[in-house]
């Protein structure tokens, strides 16, 4: 069974359910559900709703089901510095691009990033709505901002120049935003996980340049995330084609570093940190148990799934 032909039924996804102890503590605190089985059933109920939406949003199918119950950002080494920046830099803005249910947005807020300065964005607003259901909140109870739109659509995000000095105009009020374009040059922290690998090599470069235009030039401003990677850049031929019919293109640590330092940004203007990790390491599972789990859920390719964990910081 390939990762893109998995069945659209709740029973199958119950086999994939797993929360790391830290994630369990986070979801318990955020939802108020203390019984583990009750929490599981609540999450599975939201996943069932996600399945219905994701069948229509084919490119997001796996991501909405498999990533909604994880704290992705907090697994990345740069995360602590991102939260520190939010606490210490006046008016620092955090953008989670491709935020899906907003799990990482909520984790950042729980860890101290000011809610009023956080914004999530995703192609499909339905996922943000499901996030409220997942965490049992309303927009008034969790007032982080959200903008639905396509990052590649210039009417939603017009490419801006990479700045060497702060913009002449102040950052816009987040409550007034209809698109991301007014944020060009104003965002202190951008998180982008499980996102870049959805696109071709050319589109990944285009996306990187757009995010660089959004980033504040103030030293310490950062873009960080994680997504599928390979030791050598190229198509992941061992994996079945994605639902759009294309093979997934994956960068290597070397090519990912070169994309940002010397291509998107002028050489020496940023510090790029990147590491290739096996997915099992991220949930602290030993190799034998991970391989057995891959067999159990009939997804053998996840046994060798590797992720780039990375950050790009302005100097």
Image (tube, helix red, strand yellow):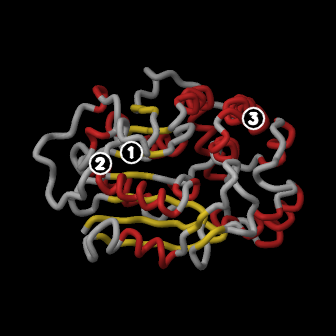
Residue 157: give x, y in percent of width and height. 35, 42
Position of 254 relative to 224 (above/below): below
Position of 165 relative to 70 (above/below): below
Q: Is any atom of residue 207 visible in this view?
A: yes
Q: Which of these two is toward me, 296 or 298?
A: 298
Specify which label sits upstream in the sequence, 3 or 1: 3
Residue that numbered label 2 is attached to: 187
Residue that numbered label 3 is attached to: 44
The alpha-carbon separation of the residues under discs 1 and 2 comes to: 7 Å
Specify which label sits upstream in the sequence, 3 or 2: 3
Residue that numbered label 1 is attached to: 95
Quadrant of the image for the N terminus? bottom right
The alpha-carbon separation of the residues under discs 3 and 1 comes to: 27 Å
Residue 176: give x, y in percent of width and height. 28, 26
Q: Which of these two is toward me, 136 or 98?
A: 98
* Residue under the image location 52 percent in, 66 percent down: 309
Position of 129 relative to 272 (above/below): above
* Residue under the image location 86 percent in, 38 percent down: 11
* Residue under the image location 37 percent in, 68 percent down: 260
Q: Which of these two is toward me, 91 or 32?
A: 91
């Amino acid at each position: 069974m390939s990762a893109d032909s998995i069945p659209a039924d709740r029973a199958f996804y119950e086999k994939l359910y797993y929360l790391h102890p830290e994630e369990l503590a986070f979801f318990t605190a955020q939802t108020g559900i203390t019984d583990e089985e009750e929490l599981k059933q609540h999450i599975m109920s939201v996943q069932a709703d996600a399945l219905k939406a994701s069948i229509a949003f084919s490119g997001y199918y796996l991501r909405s089901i498999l990533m909604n119950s994880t704290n992705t950002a907090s697994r990345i080494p740069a995360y602590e510095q991102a939260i520190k920046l939010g606490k210490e830099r006046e008016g620092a803005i955090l953008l989670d691009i491709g935020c899906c249910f907003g799990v990482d947005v909520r984790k950042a807020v729980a860890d101290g990033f000011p809610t009023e300065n956080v914004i999530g964005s995703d192609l499909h607003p339905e996922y943000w709505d499901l996030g409220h259901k997942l965490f049992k909140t309303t927009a008034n109870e969790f007032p982080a901002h959200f903008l639905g739109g396509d990052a590649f659509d210039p009417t939603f995000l017009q490419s801006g120049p990479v700045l060497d000095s702060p913009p002449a105009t102040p950052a816009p009020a987040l409550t007034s935003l209809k698109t991301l374009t007014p944020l060009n040059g104003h965002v202190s922290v951008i998180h982008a996980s499980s996102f870049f690998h959805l696109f071709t090599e050319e589109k990944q470069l285009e996306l990187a340049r757009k995010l660089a235009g959004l980033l504040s030039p103030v030293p310490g401003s950062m873009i960080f995330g994680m997504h599928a990677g390979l030791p050598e850049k190229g198509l992941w031929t061992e994996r079945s084609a994605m639902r759009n019919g294309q093979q997934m293109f994956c960068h290597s640590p070397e090519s990912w570093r070169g994309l940002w330092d010397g291509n998107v940004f002028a050489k020496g203007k940023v510090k790029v940190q990147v590491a290739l990790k096996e997915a099992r390491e991220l949930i602290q599972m030993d190799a034998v148990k991970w391989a057995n789990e891959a067999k159990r859920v009939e997804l053998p390719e996840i046994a060798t799934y590797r992720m780039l964990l990375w950050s790009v910081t302005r100097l």
